[in-house]
Amino acid sequence: MSVSPAATTPHASKVRRRFLERLRNSGVNDPRVLRAFAEVPRHLLIPEALRDRAYQETPIPIGEGQTISAPGVVATMTMALQLEGHERVLEIGTGSGYQAAILSRLASEVVSIERIPRLAASARSALDRFGVTNVVVFLGDGTRGRPDLAPYDRIVVTAGGPEVPRPLLEQLAPDGMLVGPFGQRRSQKLTRFRRRSDGGFAGDILGECDFVDLIGQNGWQR
Ligand code: SAH
């Protein structure tokens, strides 16, 4: 993955060192996950005018009324997926491409779906610039999943819906896990579902959160 000159100035490397330190202090203790966060240039995925905030613990607008989640939230979701490296992952809500770039370093293959054409296109070109080759970005309604490419070992939903989309649960492999925010419009519970070997699902709640809307057939209707 190439690193921009902006990331190599002494100030920038100090900012990124502190960023990793904060992630570590917040409980991100998997060295592979920390390395992924160290290597993905988050500042290159957000509007230029907001770049000085790139490594702060804050969501940042990325256009079209959408936001890139705060890094701690991305880290929590990534840790919750318990990736070992061999997994096929489905992501709903490509947005800036940040979560997809992180996942690309921790799993074998990432399928990511975005409903807004401009975001899908700019995420794709950013991933190409970073040399990421194991992520495919599709334009469409991610609440239906992508049954033609199922099953997935992991599914991560990065927009908040009223409840977990049923088609996504159905596209999970046995013992697979889905992590996503479900509940009300401005307040959701970050939830992890596990597909048990008897075919049922077990859910546990990881925390409270506030994501942008998951809009689609099995999400909010705008
Ligand atoms: N994972 C992204 C987070 C972006 S915010 C990142 O790392 O930057 C959530 C994204 O979900 C937005 O881009 C929004 O357009 C998208 N989204 C909302 N509903 C969707 C749906 N039904 N299918 C696909 N994408 C959706």
Image (spheres, helix red, strand yellow):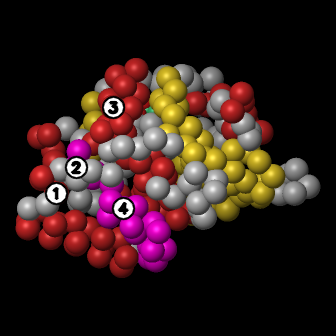
> For residue 118, which quarter of the picture?
top left
Q: What number is the disc on residue 125?
A: 3
- Residue occupying the point 85% across, 52% down: 200
Mark 4: few/some/many CA within 10 Å (<14, 14-19, 20+) = many
Sequence-wise first label, 4 or 1: 1
Numbered circle sitting on residue 7: 1
On screen, residue 60 above or below 190:
above
Q: Which residue is mark 4?
A: 37
Q: Earlier in the sequence, mark 1 or mark 3?
A: 1
Q: Residue at x 45, y 45 (%)?
A: 100
Q: Are marks 1 and 2 in contact (CB under 8 Å)?
A: yes
Nearer-the-camera pick, 76 or 13:
13
Callout 1: helix, strand or loop?
A: helix
Label 3: few (<14), some (14–19) or many (≥20) C-alpha neighbours in 10 Å = some
For the residue marked with disc 4, what is the amino acid?
Phe
Q: Quadrant of residue 33?
A: bottom left
Foreground label between 1 and 2: 1
Residue ID for mark 2: 43
Say what secondary structure mark 4 lies in.
helix
Identify residue type, mark 1.
Ala
Ligand 1 is found in which quarter of the picture?
A: top left
Over which residues does the magenta segment extend?
27-44
Q: Tell me the chief SS of the magenta region.
A: helix
Identify which residue, 77 or 216, lies in the foreground: 77
Residue under the image location 39 percent in, 32 percent down: 124
The numbered mark, 4 or 3, whose residue comes first in the sequence reads 4
Structural distance between the alpha carbons of marks 4 and 2? 12 Å
Q: Amino acid at mark 2?
A: His
Whole-angstrom CA distance, mark 2 to mark 3, is 15 Å
